[in-house]
Image: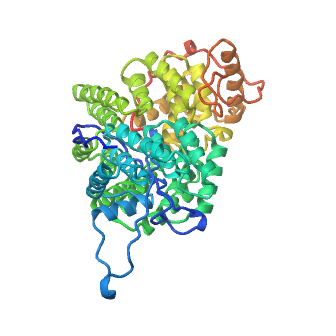
Amino acid sequence: MDIEERQPVPAGPGPGQPVGPRSGGAAGPGSGEPDGPAVTGGPGAGRSPLARRVLIGAAVGCVVLGGVLVLLPSTGPGGAPPPSPGPVARAMTAVGAGAPAALPDLAALIGDRETHLRAHPRDDQSWAVLGTAYAEQARRTATAAYYPKAEKALRTSLDVRPKDNAAALDGLAGLAVARGDFRTAKQWGEASVKLAPKRWTAYPALVDAYTGLGDPKATRRALDRLLALRSGPVTQAVAARAYWDRGWREDAGAAIADATAGATTPSQQAAFLQQGGQLAWERGDVQESLDHYRAAVNTDPDEHGALAGQGRALAALGRTSEALRAYQTALAKRPAPRYALELGELYEKLGLPGAARVQYDLVRELVRRDAAGGVDDELVLGFLEADHGDPQEAVRRLRAEWDRQPGIAVADALGWALHRAGDDAQALTFAARTMDKEHGGEVRSALYAYHRGEIERGLGKTGPARRHLAEALRINPSFSPLLVPAAQQALAALGEPPAEGLPEPSDHEEESATSGDSGAAGESGESTGAAGAPGTAAPQPAPRPSSSGPAVAPAATRSPSAPAPVPSTAR
């Protein structure tokens, strides 16, 4: 079966935070060996860093890619040291280890496997390797046109070998994560685990899939199993992301530092440096994040996500011209919607509405292009519509996204869209979920705290609003060029807390009162889906036992003197 000729990678501006590739697996990776080339039983999958949300932003935001082992001789002819591996061998080794491959090496591997498969179309392993390489190429370059080619190659591997083909299953799970389709990733990943329970290569995809579906217990089980089966820098990078999501900031920082120290190639090290920069940014260490991003680009100039990270950090440091250049370079080299949105909001902050509109139009264009490749960019598009377009359209899109995959990032985005559309009472049910530990809301996010604070302010809940707005600025005083001034103005408008009198309600009391109201909203016919049963109609998220707390005021009770909501940015 001949493979179609590779098409040139379309050039175009657009941002996108890279998500680290997934690891390839050993045929029996329960040995606990450090991350390295997989054993010849078949390729597997694993992943390296991603920026959050979103993040989403995005996070989200991770890719699980299958791999293949390349066994190199320990010595050359006559006992001489073996020659250095060429680009194809380097890329195959990186894919087998679940680590990022250098873009030139990756292109060489794709060309090599295409040529091989024209002569040997029944080679199921090579089809799996080719599909994995296409998916990695799509991720690294934000060229969604490679994703259908990756799916075709991986499904061909399954057609050739329909049974006992864990490599293809791992690759399909990783492809689904790359596209943001967490339900499909869960299906493929669980099929792989059922087929080969002691292979580690499906678990990085499952960690991402369960996170995206809002199932924190399953996420933890998958991570524990991964760490029991495999050690090394790739799994440490996966753990760093999961630790951050659980609010374990120090553990996340230590894990990604260990991963960076253990990296074996420049591309791998650059990816982990980029992830370390994202973690530093999220906790408000702007200069440290900039240092990490610069080190990543110096290590591997093709780590384009770090260029956008530099733009974010430079803007926070007031170095606007440098920030604009960094964003523009990242967009030219790795077009993805998130970076276009960030750049547009930076232009808006600078008082350049025309330039901002150009970027917002670009976001829509890039989302359409990604959709043709099967990529889910609904979070980015939802934020764009909520803040710079039609909030009702944002609510419609994000409700559908919540029904498909009700993760914490979607809860935040939908809550914010409802707020922008004027429905603060219902918005609070989703904003509260982002901080509900029972449903995985453990991450300390300045954006989540800001969104919740503004929603509470709209409802006249001055105490909780003051607390969450202040928390956003404590977590990351530079989290957004647009929203930091908005948070400061909102706090000033709320004034100081009362010196005497009854204590202000706790978060638990507020969430209990909100849960009672959300139940009423659910009875009215609104359906938002439910975590643990993605895509099914269900009551409002995460109801807790009701309390005698005050009823949530309708959106119409917003104080006329309260400043209008300000557009969001930098997710």
In the image, 253 versus 483, the foreground residue is 253
* Quadrant in which the C terminus is drawn: top left
Does residue 261 appear in the picture of this structure?
yes
Answer with left or right where residue 70 lies relative to residue 252.
left
Residue 441: x and y in percent read 61, 40
Instruction: State which quarter of the image contains the N terminus.
Output: top left
* Residue situated furthest bottom in the rendering: 78
Q: Residue at x 40, y 27 (%)?
A: 381
- Is residue 400 found left or right of 261 in the rendered image? right
310 and 304: which one is in front? Answer: 304
On the rendered structure, is 462 left or right of 397?
A: right
x, y (%) of residue 155? 44, 41
Against 108, residue 420 (above or below) is above
Residue 424 higher or lower than 76, as above or below:
above
Q: Nearer the viewer, residue 318 or 138?
A: 138
Is 241 situated above or below 182? Answer: below
Q: Is residue 566 visible?
A: no
Circle count: 0
Q: Position of residue 427 (x, y in %)?
A: 57, 23
The answer to which image quadrant residue 449 occupies is top right
Name the foreground residue: 116 vs 195.
116
Q: How is the image coloured?
A: rainbow
Residue 458, x across and y down, in percent: 54, 22
Image point (67%, 35%), residue name = 507
- The quadrant holding residue 88 is bottom left
